[in-house]
Every structure is written in C-alpha cells, then in structure tokens.
Image (cartoon, grey):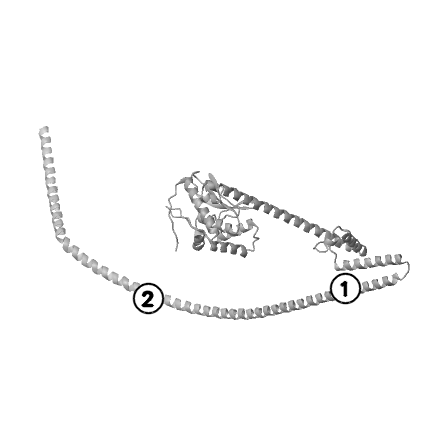
Amino acid sequence: MVNVQFQDIPTGNAGTGVTVKEMINESIQGSVDLPVITTARKIVLANNVNPRNEREIADHLFFWVKEHIHFVRDPVYAELLQSPRRTLEAKQGDCDDLSTLLASLNLAVGNIPRFVTVAHVDPDQFSHVYLQVMTDKGWVSYDAVVRESVPGWEVKNFVNKAFWAFNISDVNVGMGNVFDKIYDELKRFERRVRKEVRRAARRIRDEKRRTFKKITEEFARWEKMGMFGKFLVLGVKILMPGFIFFQFTKNPFKLTSDEWMMFAKLGMTITSAVLSIVSGGAAIPLLTASVLSLANTGISAYELKENIDARKDVIKQLKEASVQFAVEERTQREAIEKLETDNKILELIENKARAYLEESELFQAENRKKTESKEMQMKIRNIDLATEYRIQKEREFSNFRRKDDQRIYVKYKAKIDAFNSLVNRINMIGAGYEKAKSEFDFNLKTFQDTMAYTKVG
C-alpha cells in the first residue's frame, strides 16, 4: 500500500529549500533501504566496477537510472516527491524523483552526492534539479532527465544556481548540529587523506614495477653475452646489500635455480683452492676431495631432481595440451556436425521456400485468370444494367413529359385563350386605328387643299 502525505510549501526559493531538504531526507532514508542497496550492488557487480573508483561507480549508476527509469512530469497543481523505493517500483518520475533515486544509490555504495538547482527565467524560481557526485577529480554532474546528457554534462543557460550538500543538518536544522558538521568535515578530510595515501602507494608500486622490469631486461641482455654475462649478473646479485632478504621476495635480484647451482659450484671451487693452499698437500686434500665429491653428488642429485621436475612439468603440459586438443577437437566436431545439420535445415527450408514460391506463382496465375474473367463478366453485366437503366429512365422521362405537357395544357388553356382573344382585340383596335388615321390624313389633306385654294382666290 502506497503511503501518501500532503504538505503545504511556500513559493519561490523558500519552497525550493523545503523540497530539496525533503529530497535529502528521502535520499538518506533510501540509502539504507534494502531494495535500494541491493539494486546499487547489483549494478556495481554486473559491470565489474572497481569498488574504490567513485567516478566509475557513479557513471554506471547514472546510465542504469537513465536506461530503466522514465521521465514523467508532476501534476499541474502539486509538487509530487517519491521515495527511492517507489521510483524503483514505478520505473518513472520527474527530475527530483530521478535525482533522489540516483543520490540514494550513490549513498548506498559509499559515494558522496549533492543536489544542484537551477533557474532558467526567474532567479527566484528554481525549475530544475540534478545531482553531483564527489570523485577524485572533483564534483561531477549527472542529469538523468536530459536525453543527450552524459556524465559531466550540465545545464548551461540559467540565471541562478544553488548547491545543496548532504549533511544531516540539512534535514534537521539546529545549533546542536554544528559539531556534526565539523565531524562530517573531519571524516571527509580523513577519506581524502586516505585516498591520497593510497594513490601515492599505487604510484610507488607502479614505479617499483617499472624499475624491476628495466633491471630484469638489463640482466637478460647481459646473459645473452655468454658465460661472462651470467657471472656478471650473479656477482651483481650476490654483492647487492640485503642479498638474503631479496631471496625471500619476488624481485629481479632473487637467484634462479641455475644461478644457485653456479654459485654453489663457484663456492666449492674457491673452497677447494683455499683448502689446497692451506693444507699444503697434506691429508686435507683427501677430505677436500671427499667434500667436493659429496657436493658434486648433491648438485647432480639436485640437477636430476630439477630435470625430473622439468620432465613432470613437460608431461603435465603435454597432458593439458592433449586434453585441450581433445576438447578443441570435440568442439570442432560438434561445430561441424552443427554446421551440417544447419546446412540440411537450410536446404530443407530452401526447398520448401521454392515449392511455396511455385505454388504461390500458380495460385497467382489462376487467381489472375479468375480475376480477369470476373472483371469481364462484371463489365458485361454493368453494361447491360446501364442499358436497362437508361431505357427505363428514358421511358419514365417520356411518360413524365407527356403527362406534364397535358397538365400544363389543361392548366394554361384558359389563359392562352384569353391571351389570344386579347391579341385579336388589339389587332382589331390596330386596324381601326389605321383606318381612322387614313381618314384623318385624307381630311387633313382636303382641308389643306381648301385653305390653299381660298388664299389664291
């Protein structure tokens, strides 16, 4: 069951401070939550990460969150803040949820994070948050929300930025936490000192390894000069201060078995010469010869043991090579059998595909013929139907015209008759008018003639 709590927060920078402190509290609590710890350790183990390399751990945690947790925005009228476990279960959240989860994962494996808030438009209104992790190179930014972001990438265009450190005092503010701050700073200083000491030790170890390698290469170059070079290498190793100590550690001054044999023979030769000189030809030479013979016998036995051990090593290597050869032969045989099986399967698939293609082509040809025949039948049928429909419509149109003409004739016959009568009357009036006009013109001419005759008379 999901536990939901509601809280009124102020606006502006004060609200951002309350939100970020709650994010720090959730991150710290999530870093001791078993699912979060298990997830962080699985990521580290799956990528074979050096557990003391903060940058490499932080990079892999960042890529995991970016790949498995999807970004989704908060509700319009609320600032939703999820616990790291809830974000892992839901596999989604906004920038503060992804940053809180990433912070808790880093805390769970020993990294020190901090939050960074940025404002893009209004300096008093922070609009985005991402994470930074302390590494041996300093603080590195991780913004899991931006799709194109990589470790070290961060927002460039902003008008205000704030950093929020992960101290318990950030969650519970009070004067009693001053000593906690000092203690945390001392712990961080101690960790930095330890890191520097380990780094210096690694540098010394690497330098020692490089020096020993150069000495070994120089000794090998001397030994290629022949017996003189071998005696020269033996003399340098014997005369080195701390000769006995070098024989119990791995270093270039440790004598090999051949060099020990050479050293023993050289010592016996010198001892024999000294005893011969000291004895002056007395009974000592017999004792010396016995000692030398015993020493030579021991040397021969040691060489025989070395040869037996070498032969045993050769036999062991031959057996291992035989086993390896048998394994490789079996692997090759299995691979050949698998290839043959795959070839048979491919041939079967190819034959089936060819048969299917032939059947498909036959089906398409038959379907094409059926389709063409069907199209021809449909065209003929459509032509017949169109002809019948045209004839029917022409017949209906003729009937309609005939009926319409009769209806119009009956409807307008009286008006047409009245119009014809009116036309006849107009024609009669026009004829009377012409007659009256002719009479008027005749009378007018007669009158004009009469008037003219009167004037002449």
Q: Nearer the viewer, residue 247 or 341?
A: 247
Q: Nearer the viewer, residue 149 or 351?
A: 149
Q: Is residue 136 visible?
A: no
Q: Is residue 215 visible?
A: yes
Name the residue at 58% across, 70% down.
Answer: 337
* Total labels drawn: 2
Q: Which residue is mark 1?
A: 302
Name the mark on residue 61. none
Crowding around mark 1 (Cα neighbors within 10 Å: few <14, some 14 to 19, many 20+) is: some
Q: How much space separates mark 2 and mark 1, taking CA atoms?
A: 113 Å
Q: Amino acid at mark 2?
A: Arg
Q: Is residue 303 left or right of residue 2?
A: right
Q: Nearer the viewer, residue 69 or 243?
A: 243
Of the 4 image quadrants, the one containing the N terminus is: bottom left
**Residue 272 x, y percent position in the rendering:** 85, 59
Q: Which residue is mark 2?
A: 381
Q: Nearer the viewer, residue 262 or 143?
A: 262
Name the residue at 46% across, 46% down.
Answer: 24
Name above or below for residue 281 compared with residue 25: below
**Residue 443 x, y percent position in the rendering:** 9, 37
Q: Secondary structure at mark 2?
A: helix
Name above or below for residue 127 compared with residue 39: above
Crowding around mark 2 (Cα neighbors within 10 Å: few <14, some 14 to 19, many 20+) is: few
Q: Secondary structure at mark 1?
A: helix
Q: Amino acid at mark 1?
A: Tyr
**Residue 426 x, y percent position in the rendering:** 12, 45
Name the residue at 25% across, 63% down.
Answer: 392
